[in-house]
Amino acid sequence: MTDSQVEESQVRDSETESALEKPQVGIWELAWPAIVGNLLYAVIGIVSIKIVGSLGPEAVAAVTTGHRIFFGFQAILMAVSTGTAAMVARAWGAKDYSEAAHVTSVSLWIGNFVAVALMLPCIIFAKQIAGVFGLDENTTRQAAEFIRYLSLFNIAFAINMVIGASLRAAGDTRTPLWVGAVTNVVNVILVYLLVYGLHGAPRLGVPGAAIANGLSFTVGALILLYLWYGKKLRVGVGGRGSMTLKRIRQLVHIGYPAAIEQFVFQGGFVAFLWLVGYYGTAAFAAYGIGVQILSISFVVGFGFSIAGATLVGQHLGAKDPDGAVRQGWRATGLAIASMTALSLVIVFFARDIALFLIADEQVVQHTVTFIYIMAIAQPMMAIEFTLGGCLRGAGDTRFPLITTMIGLIGVRVGLATLFAYLGLGVGWIYGALIGDYLVKSLMLVHRFRSGKWKQIFKEADHKF
């Protein structure tokens, strides 16, 4: 063997050892920026609800409906970001940074294409879509306007989702944090100006909230694109060789179950909210306000979900499945403790917070009932958020789909339908969520303990 061959062999050995190094980033290091960023988003959301709430329960119900439908139509985009996160985390754990860049570029092109395709039905059929909730004419009209205006910013939303998912999968949760902070501040300022028509801005009411959301997405997207193409982000730009059939197939293979899951999830939510809407606008508005208040607790679970997904994917990429298991359980335990503690604080101040957001006594009573019920479900929600995220980070997107179909459609909607049929109060409808999260958490714990998720990428690589 020549000297050059010996040197080349040593380089290869060094690269192999480097690729097998275990990721050094800890759960808290990944989770806290995501938690803070989502917490800021939740607080801004509460402020937005306060602003819109001054227009009455119909306006709150319209925004709740509009957001639900908007995110329902983004199911495919969410699937793209799920595939992106799993593939980038795996590449990053293996120290294959160029592959992470290629995956991000492919995902961004696919995301933009999907965004344009989703825009058209939201613009053309907005009123028909909003009408499925069975709300009164005025609320339905406002919800349709919200959907129509917000869908114009689909591409900006896609850019935020894909690049944000890629950065978090590579272990950079701080950049999405500060970009999100800027985005949220812009959002609340614009909501205040455009809903009320202050300082020379037009008074737009509910559509103003949608436009404010969309413009804030645009600000975030422009910042991320500037940093990405300027090579100032951890994940690089893939270049011409990114768009390969193998990468597209892998993204589809990992992402399409997540897309189906989102369709099932959003469809189940539509059915559930239709049942809530059966009890009137006050019950519907209370659901939206209650979710917004409890989002302060939810964002902790989302933060640990991101951390768990990133570390599970990176440890698997570094050929350390035992490390992936340890990080998954640790993230879940931290999520349960944190979400439960926060929910107890929210329960204590439930009525005061609800009264701050809206003056309607009936809406306040329903909101307090909803918060009490959801506080019981917090430990189970923590398990669903975190272990579901860990499985998706490993590329196992099919099992979370199954849990969503059984828990949301079978249990939540099934129980809510039964309770409505029996003529029980809306509190029983809210209570169906406990059964949903109980079933899903038990299924996810069983799946994670089985270890079958460790082989998903090997099966995909063999297939493609």
Image (cartoon, rainbow, N blue to C red):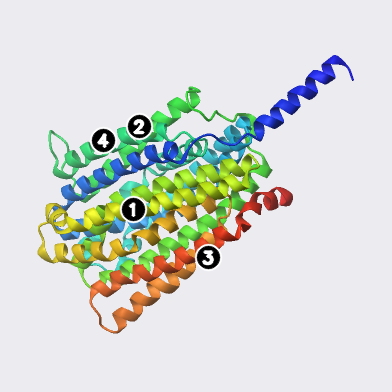
User: Taking 436 as reference, is 73 above or below it?
Assistant: above
* Mark earlier in primary sequence (3, 1): 1
362 lies left or right of 288: left
Q: Which residue is mark 2?
A: 178
Q: Are marks 1 and 4 in contact (CB under 8 Å)?
A: no
Mark 2 to mark 3 CA distance (whole Å): 35 Å
* Picture quadrant where residue 37 is located: top left
User: In this view of the protein, can residue 172 be seen by the observer?
Assistant: yes
Tell me the amino acid under the disc marked 2: Trp
User: In this view of the protein, can residue 142 be seen by the observer?
Assistant: no
Tell me the amino acid under the disc marked 3: Ile
Which of the numbered marks, if any, corresponds to residue 339?
1
Count of number-bearing discs: 4
The crowd level at tag 1 (other Cα within 10 Å; few <14, some 14-19, many 20+) is many
| Residue 307 drawn at (x, y percent) | 46, 43
Q: Which residue is mark 3?
A: 402
SS at badge 3: helix
SS at badge 4: helix
Mark 3 to mark 4 CA distance (whole Å): 37 Å
**Residue shown at 77% from the left, 23% from the top:** 10
* Quadrant where the image shows the N terminus: top right
Residue in the foreground of this view, choosing between 170 and 413? 170
**Residue shown at 28% from the left, 57% from the top:** 291
**Residue shown at 44% from the left, 69% from the top:** 439
User: Taking 406 as reference, is 85 above or below it?
Assistant: above
* Mark earlier in primary sequence (2, 3): 2
Q: Which residue is mark 4?
A: 185
In front: mark 3 or mark 4? 3
| Residue 112 drawn at (x, y percent) | 49, 41
In front: mark 1 or mark 4? 1
User: Taking 98 as reference, is 303 above or below it?
Assistant: below
